[in-house]
Amino acid sequence: MSESLTVAAAPTADSAVWARGLTRRFGKETAVDAIDLSIRPGEFYGLLGQNGAGKTTTIKMIVGLLRPTAGTAGISGFDTWQQPLEIKKRIGVLPEEFNLYERLTGAELLDFTAAMHGLERDEAVERRRQLLELLDLTEAAGKLVGDYSRGMRKKVALAAAIIHRPPVLFLDEPFEGVDPVSARLIQDLLRRYTAQGATIIFSSHEMYLVERLCTRIGIMQRGRLLVEDTPAGLCSRMEVESVEDAFILAVGGDTNSEGLQWLHTSAG
């Protein structure tokens, strides 16, 4: 990647999500390398990268699930590690590998989450009803979460992440394992959410969804933030037609499969 394309985001006082020099090492390996990040209120921000690029590690440090080796991060005017309770009030998190209370029903899980965030009982019940209906989980509301399919678990985890209406939502591969109808419902829900001023940070390998949903994109490689831009701006500066093409060009991906000669010979 050309140095001229590298963009270092400068955190500002009005950033909804920010990071300064955020670094995480595992032994001798640097998973995230001194990232500066600034995401404005109302943005739908896509964080992209190949497997092992540092996306999930970055999100975990910002939300308080993994302590950084160096640097800091936060939400609005609050520091994740200095004011953890204030951070948890303001975020919803859908991690890639979610740990749910499997001996609760879907309805009980949402009621429990709502109670943890201090919602009044009547309001919590109404929000739970609406979320279960929207995500096509009403019939499964009385079933144990442990008996849900992966797609159903993803949807109930999303419902739990947004039931308290946090101003910032972190989504790590939110559409993985979700059927096309449910995926479209979730897309519409997230668009409406950002239209009301919420900020979403979205990590995915589904490039067409990133291009469709995101207002700005950051591309990571080997723990560093290579470039940030709007989808259209990214395509323009890379002189390509799609975000997928821009991503592959940015990370120097090799899509040539000619080396597998044995795979292209006749099996007959």
Image (cartoon, rainbow, N blue to C red):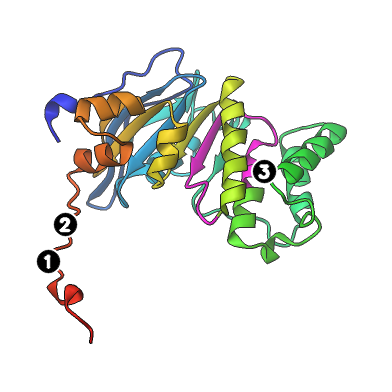
Farthest top residue?
13
- CB under 8 Å between discs 1 and 2: yes
Residue 226 shown left or right of residue 189 in the figure? left
Q: Earlier in the sequence, mark 3 or mark 1?
A: 3
- Mark 3 sits on what residue? 160
Q: Can the viewer see residue 6?
A: no
Q: Please give the label number shown on residue 256.
A: 2
Q: Give the range drawn in magenta.
A: 157-177
Occupied quadrant, residue 169: top right
Q: Can the viewer see residue 211?
A: yes
Element on which disc 2 rests:
loop
- Mark 1 sits on what residue? 259
Three-letter amino acid code of the residue under disc 2 = Asn
Three-letter amino acid code of the residue under disc 3 = Ala
Quote the CA–CA distance across marks 1 and 2. Answer: 8 Å
Quote the CA–CA distance across marks 3 and 1. Answer: 46 Å
Three-letter amino acid code of the residue under disc 1 = Gly
